Amino acid sequence: MRKYNELLQNIVRGMLRAGLVEEVLAFAQGLNESDIVPLFITDEQDVERIATVSYYPCSLANLFAEYGDNSKKTAMIVRSCDARAMVELAKRHQVNLDNLYLVGIECYGVVQAKDKNHHIYIFPEEMELDGELKPLDEGILSPNCRRCEYPIPTMADVSYRIERNGESLVTANTEKGMRILSAANISPSETPQPDTTVVKERAARWQEREFGELRKMEPRERLNYWLSQFNKCIKCYGCRNSCPVCYCKDCYLGPERLLVRREKIPPETLFHITRLIHIGDICVNCGQCEAACPMEIPVSKLFHMLNKELSVIFKYEPGLDISSLPPISTITEEDLARTGVDLD
Amino acid sequence: MDTVQGQNFEPQILGFLCNWCSYAGADLAGVSRFQYPPNIRVIRVLCSAKVDPLYVMKALLNGIDGVLIAGCHPGECHYVTGNYYARRRAVMLHKLLEVIGLEPERLRLEWVSASEGTIFAEVVKDFTRTIKSLGPNPLKPEGI
């Protein structure tokens, strides 16, 4: 386990020692090897607990938005979906990126909770299962990860790559990233960005498979499919609570807002549609909603599908660029010139 | 009311009309006695941007057959940019309806100014025709 973490732990230790950050939010080993827990690390002796296995129990961006301190210098060890969620939250003034150092791990997918007892690392075409290198079985990946086309955390300050021979590489993406590396006394490697065509092809294939079968359906059939899925809902609010970009403190879905009826299970379809309206345009496809759902409703598929359609229309990729503003609440120069009721 | 698709189907249409242009346009249509189908039920809103996508979805999920949002022409909004927001939301809602399996045609955004009484009547006629050809909303509860 140790070999993949060594460089990462050196980076974290260096940041804490140099006083660059006061605390580090990362996943760490809990009671045993398969117990991965989020941890705010302030003490150097906890650094060796940091885990990099390909299992991601919750969204760190969500945790930081809820429990983090925006006035403290903090570092976060995140995968690209969470790095993108942090960018989206920063656009909405929920987190302050000036005080945050994002250490991004290059991620080719994580496994679902049922496989977390394996000691697993996922690489573009291989996986290391309990110390043994095998060709990648795509079925083991979390469904959202199969559809993910952003393995490289370009929006984070440094990206950290785990090679399958046990080596790790780190590259700085920003000026803040250079500061991280100099604090840790590591010279950035000059290796070019890895080729992501394999992952992009995998994503396109799975998106085609999963969205394609829904698109092929007649509208009525598709409606019935989603209604039957929503009817399984037990209104546990797991999808809402685990979502990193769903940040409102005062939520429309709370019983006091009278939008969804109290004590009604399954809730009205509006429960899911409300979430779809609110974050459909900025969903980062982290898959936490689906992982949290006890009734196995494929929520992330629905959100990702709408998001893919909208990102074409609005020319907006969530979380990639801090300067492009949320599409639903931003008017562009081109909008002002258009007179029709459509955007094209 | 007979909800079977065909001649007897009389759609229920909800209209969100902006106070400054479209509501005045509808008023003009009434004062000038332009004929249009009585299927539309109007809610006056202060701006087309006041129409939360939730209102539209709540109406459709509760069985309304069509939703019309009407606002000022681009550049003429009383609040300068409200109708541009309404347009972005409508574009988003059209995709959302398509993804969950409702016909996107059930939502319509139109620009109607205060002087366009005839256009308002035309829009309601045309929209009612479209909804009649689509048939009743599949989500309509029994007995409505």
Image (cartoon, rainbow, N blue to C red):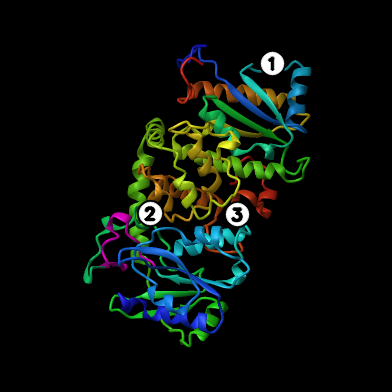
Please tell me in which quadrant of the rendered image residue A79 appears. bottom left
Q: Is residue A119 magenta?
A: yes
Chain of the residue under label 2: A
Along the horizontal axis of the image, is A154 left or right of B37?
A: left
Q: Find the distance from the CA under tag 1 to the CA under tag 3.
A: 42 Å
Residue A98 location, quadrant: bottom right
* Chain of the residue where label 1 is placed in the rendered structure: B
| Residue drawn at x 47%, y 15% as measured from the top left | B6
Question: What amino acid is at disc 3?
Answer: Pro
- Residue that label 2 marks: A144
Q: Mark 1 and mark 3, same subunit? A: no
- Name the side, left or right, on which A212 lies relative to A171: left
Q: Of the residues shown, which amino acid type is indicated by label 1?
A: Gln
Tag on residue B35?
1
Can I make out residue A221 in this image?
yes
Q: In terms of secondary structure, where does tag 2 sit?
A: helix
Circle 3 chain:
A
Residue at screen point 48% across, 32% down: A263
Q: Secondary structure at mark 1?
A: loop
Q: What secondary structure predominates along the stretch shown in magenta?
A: loop
Residue A51: x and y in percent read 37, 70
Q: Position of residue A331 (x, y in %)?
A: 67, 51
Instruction: State the SS at label 3.
Output: loop
Residue at 46%, 87% (x, y): give it: A187
- The label number, if any, that marks residue A326 in the structure image: 3
- Can you tell which of label 3 and label 2 is closer to the viewer? 2
Region in magenta = A107-127
